[in-house]
Image (cartoon, grey):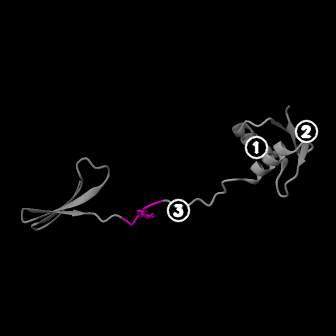
């Protein structure tokens, strides 16, 4: 506890009951107590209330779903998949998740960094 005294003026820097490290200043002037809260620094964030969420910009239907639809509709049993800018490894994960979720009769094969879709009859 910090105590500063000048004639009839006493200042106490103490912790408020039940608070965690939130000090306040209690000034006693001629036996009359005056509580003064310490001004905290401004917070680095801002909370703003909103009525509703903005619409999602995420696509509902993906390129991979279109490829799978075309593969199921095709009479071919084995198909090579080539998508510019995508590696076989990244496509494998996306196709695997979509095939499992949609329960499609298709297997994914990767050979020499090329992805193939194989229908299971």
In this view, the residue farthest toward the left is 31
- Image quarter where the C terminus lies is top right
**Residue at 9% over, 67% down:** 8
Q: Which residue is mark 2?
A: 77
Q: Which residue is mark 3?
A: 54
Is label 3 in a helix, a strand or a loop?
loop
CA distance for labels 1 and 3: 29 Å
Q: Earlier in the sequence, mark 3 or mark 2?
A: 3
In-front residue for pair 31/120: 120
Q: Residues within 10 Å of mark 1 (few under 14, many from 20)?
A: few
Q: Name the mark nearer the viewer: 2 or 1.
A: 2
**CB-based contact (under 8 Å), mark 2 and mark 1:** no
Q: Name the mark nearer the viewer: 3 or 2.
A: 2
Q: Which residue is mark 1?
A: 93
Q: Quadrant of residue 63 in the image?
A: bottom right
Q: Earlier in the sequence, mark 1 or mark 3?
A: 3
The stretch of residues the image draws in magenta is 41-52
Above or below residue 56? Residue 74 is above
100 lies left or right of 120: left
**Residue at 83% over, 51% down:** 87
**Residue at 6% over, 62% down:** 31
Is label 1 in a helix, a strand or a loop?
helix
Residue 5 x %, y %: 16, 64
């Amino acid at each position: 506890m910090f105590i500063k005294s000048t004639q009839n003026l006493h200042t106490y820097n103490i912790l408020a009951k039940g608070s965690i490290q939130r000090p306040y200043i209690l000034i006693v002037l001629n036996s009359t107590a005056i509580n003064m809260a310490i001004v905290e620094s401004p917070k680095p964030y801002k909370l703003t209330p909103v009525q509703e969420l903005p619409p999602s910009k995420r696509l509902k239907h993906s390129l991979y779903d279109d490829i799978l639809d075309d593969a199921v509709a095709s009479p071919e049993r084995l198909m090579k998949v080539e998508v510019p800018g995508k590696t076989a490894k990244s496509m494998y994960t996306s196709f695997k998740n979509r095939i499992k979720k949609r329960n499609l009769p298709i297997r994914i094969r990767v050979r020499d960094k090329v992805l193939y879709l194989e229908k299971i009859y």
